[in-house]
Amino acid sequence: MGSGGVGKSCLTVQFVSGTFLETYDPTIEDFYRKEIELDNSPCVIEILDTAGTEQFASMRDLYIKNGQGFVLVYSITNAQSFVDIQPLREKIFQLKGPRNSALVLVGNKCDMITERVVTQRDAAYLAAEWVCPFYESSAKTRVNVTNVFLDVVKVINQMKLDKTGNCCSLM
């Protein structure tokens, strides 16, 4: 989840198929599945790539209610996109509660270092405050793409383990 144009679709497509989308095509909703191995166990990840525009806010609430883990993405080249992730986190907590909200914070487009406006320090501070993993990534160069998705599954599994004493994988 995140503002339009931050690279949510590019991160997802790079993770699922290993390709980079060169052109920007605003997403309404795309669904992906990928089988991975995590901690020596098979796991199927179902990814809902959401719209970044406010006109689909009612759909966003439904996605949040049905989701287990959330990748909050901003662009390191867009200060407003960094500001926009705070209300997304608040909405997730409002609809799911903090104990049911597996979050990973991602600053995308780290390959565009000369256009950076959001510092890594500011984002790392926010992630520490939120107590969630943080990555800077590049869908274009594949930096940390896999780590982002593996970590959100790990956080989901840890939350399930904390609640039940049993670890489960996404299915």
Image: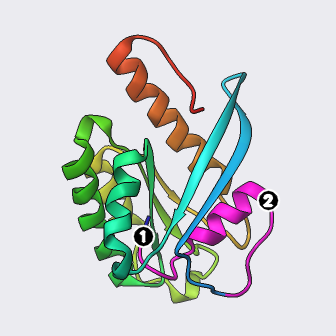
Viewer-proximal residue among 26 and 85: 26
State whether residue 102 is above or below residue 122. above
> Callout 2 environment at 10 Å: few (<14), some (14 to 19), or many (20+)?
few
Measured as percent of width and height from the top left, residue 86 is found at: 26, 65
| Secondary element type, mark 1 | loop
Amino acid type of the residue that numbered disc 2 sits on in the rendered structure: Ser
Q: Residue furthest top?
A: 165
Q: In this figure, which residue is indicated by the disc labeled 1?
A: 2
Q: Residue at x 31, y 37 (%)?
A: 100
Q: Which residues fall within the magenta stretch?
A: 2-23
Q: Residue at x 31, y 68 (%)?
A: 58
Q: Residue at x 38, y 66 (%)?
A: 59
Q: Of callouts 2 and 1, which one flags the residue occurring earlier in the amino acid sequence?
A: 1
Measured as percent of width and height from the top left, residue 98 is found at: 24, 41
The image's colouring method is: rainbow
Q: Residue at x 28, y 57 (%)?
A: 89
Measured as percent of width and height from the top left, residue 62 is found at: 36, 56
| Secondary element type, mark 2 | helix
Q: In this figure, which residue is indicated by the disc labeled 2?
A: 17
Viewer-proximal residue among 24 and 127: 24
State whether residue 77 is above or below residue 20. below
